[in-house]
Structure formats: C-alpha cells, structure tokens
Image (cartoon, grey):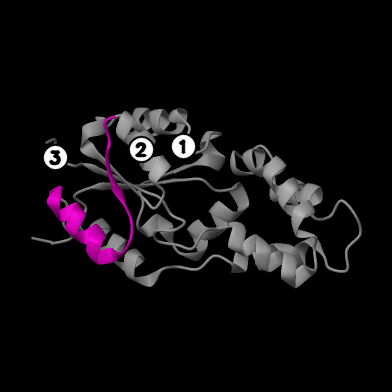
Amino acid sequence: MAKVSTLFWDNGGVILTNGWDRGSRQKAVDKFHLDWADFEDRHELMLNAFECGEASLDEYLRRTVFYRPRLFTPEDFKQFMFGESQAFAEPLAFLGEIARTKRYMNAALNNESLEINDYRIRKFRLRDYFWAFFSSCYLGVRKPDREIYTLALKITQCDPAECVLIDDRGLNLECAREFGMQTIQYMNVPQLRSELSALGVTADEN
C-alpha cells in the first residue's frame, strides 16, 4: 500500500453543513413564501451552471426567485443563503489537528457555487486548513464527473494511490476509487480517525 501524501476533503456534509441543499431550500421556500415545485424546478435547471461557475449568484436568483416582483430583496435572500452555512466543530477541529502536523497535503474537493464557496472559505478560515481548493466553481466541473478527479490529480501531481478522498456520498467515492484513489465515507470523527489511522494517517505530532 502506498504511503498517503494527500487528503482530499469534501466540505459540505463533512466539516461544514451543505451550502445550499434541499433542506436549506425548503426552509427558504417556507420563510419567503415561495412555490416549492416552481422554485425547485428552476433550481434544478440552473444547478449545473451555478455550481460550475457559469452563472453568478445574482443570475441564479434572477432565474429562480426574482423573475417576478417580490416583497423581499435579493440581499435579503442572499443573507439567508449565507446564514445556512455552519461549521461542524468536531470534524473541523480534527482537520486542524491533521493540518498542523504538516505531513500531508490537505485540499478541498467539493461542489459549490462561487459566491457561497468564497464566503465559506473566508467565514470558516479554511485557508488555515487547506493547501488548495478544487471547487467545482473554479474547475468548471462537478463531482462525480471524472474530469474533476483528473484535474485534481494533474494539478497536485499526485499518484492516485497516495491520495485519500473523504466524502459523505458514496457515488463520489465510487468514482474516485476508479482512479485508484483510496476513499473513506465520512460518518463521524471517531470512525474517520480510525479509518485514517489504518491507512497510516494520524494527527500525532511525533
């Protein structure tokens, strides 16, 4: 087994809440009195462009919400969207332990729209943890598309066998394994710590 040099971390569902998932959208529909079926249909049509950096947050909102007059402003809606992002304290602290050893390249590999992604990097000081951000909005492709894994490996110049993808979604991990990457499906910190240890990855500073 190759020695692990690089850890690719999904953000939403692992160290942070999801940025703009179905639950958050349902809360927005309730708060702003939108029509769920209409909003969700428009969201699905805009999702790929939104998360691949082809559509800005303003354009996304214009197509999904503000295609007709509303009693609230785009700024009101944006503040709600940003407020849905929260940190998971325990896994974020564990990531910090690993980062401080400086033995591994830690990088984000996530699907996220540009403005929400940038907000989360600033809000949760993710530059303190990650060496690089392989986000769909920067690369123009989303997991589980093969190209996002190809780009991450080419840019880091890492052998797939040296890499571990930590993600909460099975399909994303399945596709990474096809490239020869090692994978861990995140459930909780004790499980993650144990599975990383089995791969020789620890947060011990010795």
- Taking the spot 24% from the left edge, 30% from the top edge, the residue there is 159
Q: Looking at the rendering, in which quadrant would you find the N terminus?
A: top left
State the extent of the magenta-drawn residues as a range. Answer: 180-200
Q: What type is the residue that disc 1 sits on?
A: Pro
Q: What type is the residue that disc 3 sits on?
A: Lys
- Residue 149, by quadrant, is top left
**Residue 58 appears in the picture as rendered:** yes
**Residue 100 appears in the picture as rendered:** no
- Residue 152, by quadrant, is top left
As drawn, the label of residue 144 is 1
- Residue 203 located left or right of residue 7: left
As drawn, the label of residue 3 is 3
Q: Foreground: 127 or 65?
A: 65
Residue 204 place in picture, x, y as percent: 13, 62
Is disc 1 surrounded by few (<14), some (14 to 19) or many (20+) residues within 10 Å?
A: some
- Residue under pointer 2: 174
Q: Is residue 158 magenta?
A: no
SS class, disc 2: helix
